[in-house]
Amino acid sequence: MAKKGKAEEKKAGPATITNRKARFDFEILDTWEAGLVLVGSEVKSIYLGRVNLSDAHCRILDGEAWLIGADIEPYDKAAHFAPDRRRDRKLLLHRREIALIGRRAQEKGLTIVPLRLYFKGGRAKLEIGLGRGKRQYDKREQIAQKESRREQERARAMRD
C-alpha cells in the first residue's frame, strides 16, 4: 500500500476562490469570464488559494478592464521578486465585451464585482459579474427566508 501524505496533497489541484460577500451584497445580473495578467509567483499563490477577493472590484479605464484591490499573498518560496499584494491587475476580455460591460456599468447603481477565481486549462480565470447593490432590508429579507427554509427542513426531518 502506498504512503499517504504529500503525494495526495498534490493531487488536490488548484483552489477555487469565491467572493461570498459579493452575492450577499449585490444582486448579480450578468457574468463574464476574464483572464488575468499576473507576474512572477502570483500564479503559485493563487494555485494555493492565498487570495482575498472580498474588498476587490473592477473598473473600465481607457478601454481596458482592471481588477482593483484584490489581495494576493506573496509566494513564500519565491526567490527575489515579490510583486505588491494589492496592485491593480489587468483583465483580459474581448474589446466588445469591455465596451458592453462599460456601458452597462454606467447605468445607475450598477458595479462590476469579482465573483470567483479559478483555473481553466492551466490558466487563471476570474468570473466577474455586473451587480446592483442590495439595500439593507433586502438582506434582512433574504436571511429570514433562509432561516424559515432551515426550520421547515428540520421539521420534516423530525417527522421522518
Image (cartoon, rainbow, N blue to C red):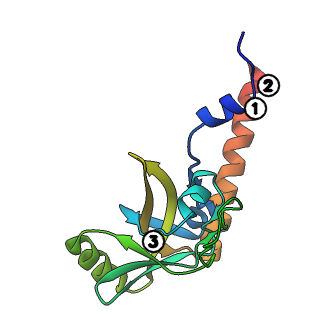
Q: Quadrant of residue 72 in the image?
A: bottom right
Say which label, 3 or 1, has the lower sequence index.
3
Q: Position of residue 91 (x, y in %)?
A: 39, 72
Disc sitting over residue 155 in the figure:
1
Looking at the rendered structure, the kind of residue marked 2 is Met
Query: At 60% from the left edge and 67% from the top edge, which residue is drawn?
Result: 53
Can residue 52 be seen here? The reply is yes
Q: Which residue is mark 2?
A: 158
Which residue is pictured at 28% across the width and 76% down the height?
98
Is 103 on the left-hand or right-hand side of 46? left
Above or below, comparing residue 42 to residue 13 in the picture: below
Residue 21: percent from left, percent from top: 63, 65
Q: Amino acid at mark 1?
A: Ala
The structure residue drawn at horizontal position 31% and vertical position 90%, both measured from the top left corner, is 62
- The kind of residue on which mark 3 rests is Gly
Quadrant in which the C terminus appears: top right
Helix, strand or loop at label 1? It is helix
Residue at 42% in and 48% down: 122
Sequence-wise first label, 2 or 3: 3
Q: Out of 78 and 51, give the one closest to the viewer.
A: 78
What residue is pinned by disc 3?
Answer: 131
Outermost front residue: 79
Residue 126, above or below 9: below
How far apart are labels 3 and 1 at the CA level? 35 Å
